[in-house]
Image (tube, rainbow, N blue to C red):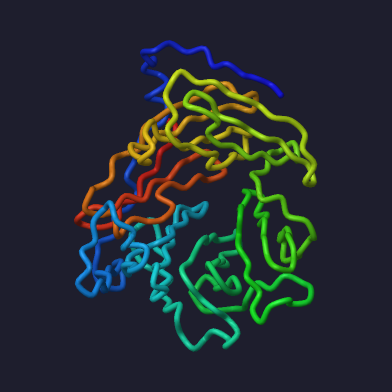
Amino acid sequence: MRIVALLTILLWPACLWAEYAATEILVIPWGDGPDELRIEEPYTDGIEITPDSAADALFPSGGPHWGFVDVEENVYFISKDLHYLKGFHNNGKAFVDAAVDTSDYEASVIKYCPTRMFVDSAGFIYVFFIHGYPSIFNSNGDFVSILDPPGDEPYPHDIVSLDFYNFDEELNIHSYKGDFIFQNGNFTKGGYRDWKASDGYYYWGNRYDTSTFRFIKFKTYAYIDTYYVKVDRKIGVGALMGIDLNDNYYMRYSESKDDFPLDILVLDRNFKEKDHFRLLPERDNMYLWNVHNATFLRGDGNVYQFLCEDDGMHVIRWGKE
């Protein structure tokens, strides 16, 4: 066990806050057009939905639910009701427009709410669901196949989840057939379900107490070490959102337990603070239509924020100036 103290002053220097700056790279309007994102009001049958209720989970809207940004800053969205999978160039023009719930699927594919999506360097789009096989689409949005881990099926339909997507295009997959790593088109037995650093170790991080983050280090399921990182700020909720290709650790957290406002704390490979910034606030009336992963980390260290506004989906890049 190791304790790492971050010695900082109460009033943060301007350089810590100004290191990362927000740039709006794209605004996608709401609507039914080819270059728009569609939103449908949820069916509530007279039930009043408020931000304090769980009704939005029971009656999902047809808005974007999960987003992804590839290395060329093309942006992809899949809707919560599975009616569409859309991809947009960074100039706002759609180049993928597919209906997910079509007969292109094999009958064995069970689809519920999507839980993860990513796009590999070849342009293939992988979509994971709460139940059912992950689905693979090509760069045109055409259904290609399901992602089926090897082994005998103990259930009529294997249930597979993507726990982590690391930036060397390694997928950590958890299923009833066991845990697997999927990389370069091949399955390897034994998934890690944690973020991978360049040293070959895997790290899991979360809030330990109101002023401490905890990181647990693994190798092939074997526990290696635990690091406790103290910070001069209050932590209500928080977790590790990813490790970039330079082994910087990105903690997404909130001072309150309401997940708002959200801050990003960047630590180097020695768990020393490098940067800190606060994400742009979300509109209160957009909670039903918000993207499930409101922030997304790329391997180059850029953080992308999907921000729902009245005029459309704003895609914000947080990067170093």
Judge whether 155 appears above or below 77 on screen.
Answer: below
Does 275 sit left or right of 244 as displayed? left
Q: Camera-side residue: 258 or 110?
A: 258
Does 317 sit left or right of 225 as displayed? left
State the residue at coordinates (33%, 55%). Answer: 290
Q: In which quadrant of the rendered image does the C terminus lie?
A: top left
State the residue at coordinates (53%, 25%). Answer: 212
The image shows a total of numbered marks equal to 0
Q: Position of residue 44 (x, y in %)?
A: 25, 71
Q: In which quadrant of the rendered image does the N terminus lie?
A: top right
Answer with the quarter of the image where residue 319 lies.
top left
Q: Position of residue 83 (x, y in %)?
A: 39, 76
Answer with the quarter of the image where residue 272 lies.
top right
Judge whether 54 appears above or below 266 on screen.
Answer: below
Q: Position of residue 153 (x, y in %)?
A: 73, 77
Does 220 sit left or right of 126 as displayed? right
Q: Position of residue 34 (x, y in %)?
A: 31, 73
State the residue at coordinates (74%, 40%). Answer: 218
Q: Camera-side residue: 125 or 261?
A: 261
